[in-house]
Amino acid sequence: MSEPTSAQTFIVIGASSFIAKAFIEQACHQHAGQQQQNLTVAEPLQIITISRQASIKLPELMGIELTDCELTGNINHQHFNCDYQQASIEQCVTDIAAIAGNVTRIVMCNGILHSKNQHISTNEPGLMPEKRIEDIDAHSLEQLFYTNSIVPMLWLSALTPLLSQPRHKVSGEQKCVISILSARVGSISDNRLGGWYGYRASKAALNMLIKTTAVEYARRLKRVKLIAFHPGTTDTPLSKPFQANVPQGKLFTPAFVANQLHQIMDSIEPDGEASYLDWQGEPINW
């Protein structure tokens, strides 16, 4: 285990996802660019990744070759394996607290819309979005709510004490922005098409959990900003079965979405409320 650091720290949960990979890649390149532009050595950057994978190296994660300056002591990477059960999440955050510096960005990229995994009890095909109410299945709903609603909340619950610690707590002009992957279909007021019962409901539940957390953070962690982020339809395995119906120009690359998210996180300020934003930074009705 590494020693504690004073570096700016980014925590990326669900680091094996396409959007997470692109977010990390851009964070590394942006930091390297700042280092080259400054006459003095730039502040170190620590990137902490979490996924089900036992180990991850940044070049493997991003599928690119990083320059020597991007993998020097100015960028430190630590990876943690997690099965996304509550005990594992809590232990992971305990381990992170021992090494993390000034936590300024947390990105949660976990999510599920469909799965090929068969039901253990019935050997029926894995879940797909429901087209009609008769398609509702208890096992599928449990998977959707656990991954899309419960897991992000378990992370927020475990991370709150860490963000309250003096060594990690942001204050003054500093801020910590937490972005959690949501979806426009989680908007109750925007639901005009119906269908996709479980996915819609699990994202709506996530939005409520985020909004409720922001009320508490307004008292306890005033410089922490929570975002429920809708990335748009992104070219990832999650959207792959549904891309045929996407209008031209509306299927985004992970790199584009990651760049938009970086800009939003850089510019947004804590205001005691949660924000439900799309990839353009435009608000979505809850």
Image (spheres, rainbow, N blue to C red):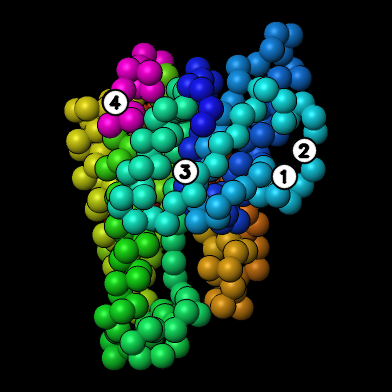
Is residue 254 visible to us here?
yes
Pointer 2: what residue?
66
How far is mark 4 from mark 1, CA to CA? 32 Å
- Give the mark nearest the N terminus, 1 or 2: 1
Q: Residues within 10 Å of mark 2 (few under 14, many from 20)?
A: some
Residue 131 picture location, percent across and down = 38, 85
Q: Of tags 4 and 3, which is closer to the observer?
A: 4
Q: Which of pointers 3 and 1 lies earlier in the amino acid sequence?
A: 1
Judged from the image, the secondary structure of the residue bearing numbered disc 4 is helix
The picture places residue 100, in percent across and down from the top left corner, at 46, 27
Secondary structure of residue under mark 3: strand
Q: Amino acid at mark 1?
A: Pro
Residue under pointer 3? 107
Residue at coordinates 32% horizontally, 63% vertically from top-left? 146
Magenta span: chief secondary structure: loop
The disc placed on residue 125 is: none
**CA distance for labels 3 and 1:** 19 Å
Q: Residue at x 42, y 57 (%)?
A: 83
Say which residue appears at 33% left-offset and 30% top-offset: 162
Residue 57 counted in the magenta span:
no
Mark-to-mark CA distance, 2 and 4? 34 Å
Residue at the spot of label 4? 164
